Amino acid sequence: MAGHSKWAQIKRKKGANDKKRSAIYSKHIRAIQAAVRSGGSGDPAGNLALKNAIAAAKADTVPADNIENAIKRAVGAAEGAADYKEVTYEGYGPGGTAIFIETLTDNVNRTVADIRAVFNKRGGALGTSGSVAWQFEKKGVILLPDASEAAQEAAIEHGAEDFQESEDGLEISTAPNDLYAVQDALTGAGFKPESGQITMIPSNTVAVNGDDARKLMALVDALEDLDDVQNVYTNADLPEEVEA
């Protein structure tokens, strides 16, 4: 869940149990194959969507062999293979939080029914198109395990828009199209980014505590468990113990 911190999101996914990790890998494989089909190429150098999908998969520790095999299968897929469409959904969660959901689906009716059922069961409400999207902005995010002054200066010098310092390092934000240029520049300057990917950043956050925080996490978990759901973003600012 990308609401409070991308560091927390990646650590949470890396720490998932085997069943959860398998589901995460499956979602990335679907995203990679959809990117190959939509971009018309299995070469990430000429297919930005594929490059983004691969970067996201690597951030969640999807093995390189799985990624390569997914690309090969997509390149050689028959015409009758599933044609996944990118569809987004918006809604509201406990504590007045905004929720933005990205899906890849070959059956929109099934997907919206599944998402609505989760919202109804978990104390949320599915909204209309545009109801909360305005609260999020697409950005590139680079995670750099180095919060030194030199790292901060390098991030700004090489085109970063902003950065957030934490005990884990720097969470650097860029314009979506500048992500890889900034990441490559940092690498060339001797730094070692942990990951870089496109995400949705909330323009403001809502503090959520107690029962509302636990209910929100249960809602997000249930949404992420749906096969068609790729990413769930919120504007929640959660206590560290709940997020962990």
Image (cartoon, helix red, strand yellow):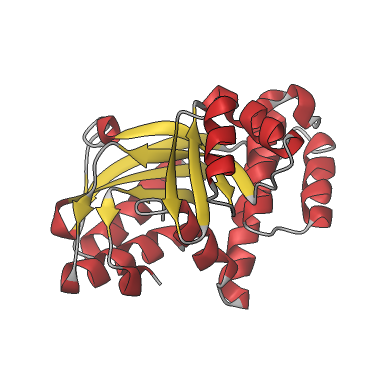
Of residues 14 and 128, the one drawn nearer to the viewer in this rendering: 14
In this picture, residue 193 sits left or right of residue 15: right
- For image coordinates 66% across by 26% down, the residue present is 181
In this picture, residue 176 sits left or right of residue 99: right
Residue 235 drawn above or below residue 136: below
Residue 196 drawn above or below residue 130: below
- For image coordinates 69% across by 43% down, the residue present is 54
- For image coordinates 77% across by 39% down, the residue present is 74
x%, y% of residue 216?
26, 63
x%, y% of residue 120?
22, 60
x%, y% of residue 197?
58, 41
Dividing the picture into quadrants, the one containing residue 223 is bottom left
Of residues 236 and 187, the one drawn nearer to the viewer in this rendering: 187
Q: Is residue 125 visible?
A: no
Residue 201 drawn above or below residue 23: above
Of residues 98 and 196, the one drawn nearer to the viewer in this rendering: 196
